[in-house]
Image (cartoon, grey):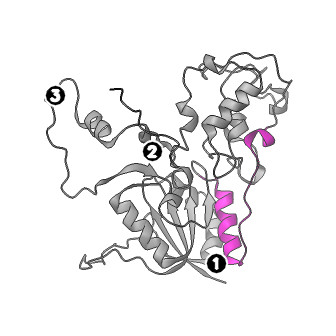
Amino acid sequence: MTVKVASEWLNACSGCEISILDMGERLLQVLEIADFVHIPALMDHKYFGQTGDGKHIDIPHADVGIISGGVRNEEHLEVAREMRKKCGVIIALGTCATHGGIPALSNSYTNAEILDRYYTTETTDPVTAYPGQGIPPLLDSCYALDEKIQVDILLPGCPPHPDHIFSALAALAAGKSPVLPDKSVCDTCPTVRMGKGELKDVRRFLEAPAYAAADEPLDKMRCLLEQGMVCMGPVTRAGCGGDALRPRCISARVPCRGCYGPVQPGGNQRLDMLNALASNGIDVRSLPESVSFLRFSGAHHMLRPKRKEA
């Protein structure tokens, strides 16, 4: 069975599209079962027709629509709605699409604050008007895809592992639902845990963790969180290591940063992480800040601008 596939990128960096290419030789297998009718990263297909004569965005009908990136401006919203209209199944590809990703950190500020910061410095004259000609107006926030349109499959990751992209497309071509990891990074982490109670505070990752040698097996290294480093493994969905389920950052002796988003789609990584630390006897007041716990999942109203005191 061959499925027609349309792909779009919204408020994204193209890392998810690179991950599609990173399927390597398996991409040839994908091309045997998938007919890409629209994918701006790889082919030239204009929104308003090849000569620009159209009046409305026109995306071909497809069985599967893959959308990376969140929704930040009116053009993103229009494209997302057109994809939803033309595609039978919508896949939110990558953490920007599923949970807002890094761009959703902007939700801590108003649009006015962001524009003022971007266009004004202490050494220039005050800006009286921001550029607007030909620029799509910003929405009031950076939204995950499912906040604006119906999404059928969430495929998180920054970027998603090529193994999971291939498995999802192969499953859909076979008329099945993709099966994705549903455990936490901690559940798949091979490092050694010695138990609760010893650690009383945590710190930023500013120094190398303790391990005997660069080639020391991970199952001989102590848990990075137990070494006092903020590791988001307890509250982050597994999958960054692909089918091997081997956490990539931890394999490089670097704490998990949380890029696959919460274990459950509606989870709150910030609240869940604070609860995890507190339940292990750690004084959360020792944290320099906790907003960064939402560095990949600030959509769904998790991050909002601070209210100014009167």
Question: Which residue matches tag 2?
Answer: 103
The answer to whether residue 70 is above or below residue 288 is below
Alpha carbon distance from label 1 to label 3: 56 Å
Name the front one of labels 1 and 3: 3
Give the secondary structure at mark 3. Answer: loop
Which amino acid type is shown beneath numbered disc 1?
Ile
CA–CA distance between discs 1 and 2?
A: 33 Å
Mark earlier in primary sequence (3, 2): 2
- Labelled disc at residue 124: 3
- Identify the amino acid type marked 3: Thr
Question: CB of mark 1 within 8 Å of CB of mark 3?
Answer: no
Q: Amino acid at mark 2?
A: Pro
Residue drawn where x is 62% and y is 16% of the image: 286
**Distance of label 3 from label 2 (alpha carbons):** 26 Å
Q: Nearer the viewer, residue 181 or 23?
A: 181
Q: In the rendered view of the protein, which quadrant contains the N terminus?
A: bottom right
Going by the picture, which residue comes out furthest to the front? 310
For the C terminus, give its image quadrant.
Answer: top left
Residue underneath mark 1: 33
